[in-house]
């Protein structure tokens, strides 16, 4: 188990109503309506929030590792994150995929950056050994499988 030596930040939220409720942060910067996946209700769900948080954190880790390696990251760096909610052994479980787009970088340098970021990103560390995680490096400017630019 990871033990923090020093707390740098504490996120505080209050959620009511569960998957069909609301969640607000103590500072008011987050105020979202929640809805269950696959329902017509407006709102986001915990899996989308987790995907957004992990991908944002992973980009931060990539930036930190790139600075250590003296590598300039491409301006159009992006991550498509997918978080699956499913059943495993009769209980709910998660799986995740991060498609890391680093167009213009050489494969070897890009892979070293991704591997280092996956070791230091707090979300990657928290999920390591707990859920099925796949990280795919994409070096082209095209969105995987669509032929479209990433958004």
Image: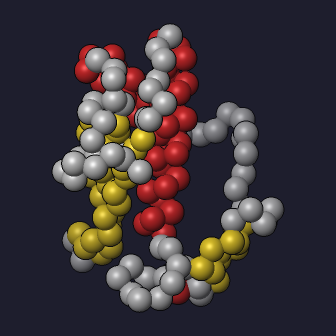
Toward the top, the furthest residue is 70
Judge whether residue 131 can be spotted in this image. no
Eyeballing the image, is 126 above or below 93? above
Which residue is at a point 69% across and 72% down the rendered structure image?
Answer: 31
Q: Where is residue 40 in the image (x, y as percent from the top left)?
A: 41, 89
Toward the left, the furthest residue is 145
Which residue is at a point 39% across and 87% down the rendered structure image?
Answer: 39
Which residue is at a point 53% across and 27% down the rendered structure image?
Answer: 63
Q: Where is residue 136 in the image (x, y as percent from the top left)?
A: 26, 39
Which residue is at a point 22% across and 71% down the rendered structure image?
Answer: 89
In the image: residue 99, left or right of residue 70:
left
Q: Position of residue 62 (x, y in %)?
A: 47, 29
Q: Position of residue 96 (x, y in %)?
A: 32, 54
Judge whether residue 12 can be spotted in this image. yes
Front position in the image: 15 or 35: 35
Eyeballing the image, is 33 above or below 142? below
């Amino acid at each position: 188990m990871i033990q923090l030596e020093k707390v740098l930040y504490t996120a505080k939220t209050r959620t009511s109503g569960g998957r069909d409720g609301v969640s607000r942060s103590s500072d008011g910067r987050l105020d979202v309506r929640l809805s269950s996946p696959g329902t017509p209700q407006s709102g986001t769900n915990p899996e989308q929030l987790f995907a957004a948080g992990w991908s944002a954190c992973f980009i931060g880790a990539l930036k930190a590792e790139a600075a250590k390696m003296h590598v300039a990251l491409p301006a159009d760096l992006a991550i498509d994150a997918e978080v699956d909610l499913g059943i495993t052994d009769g209980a709910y479980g998660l799986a995740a995929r991060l498609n890391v787009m680093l167009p213009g970088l050489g494969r070897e340098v890009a892979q070293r950056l991704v591997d280092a970021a996956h070791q230091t990103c707090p979300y990657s560390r928290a999920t390591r050994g707990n859920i099925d995680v796949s990280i795919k490096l994409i070096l082209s400017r095209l969105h995987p499988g669509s032929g479209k630019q990433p958004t």
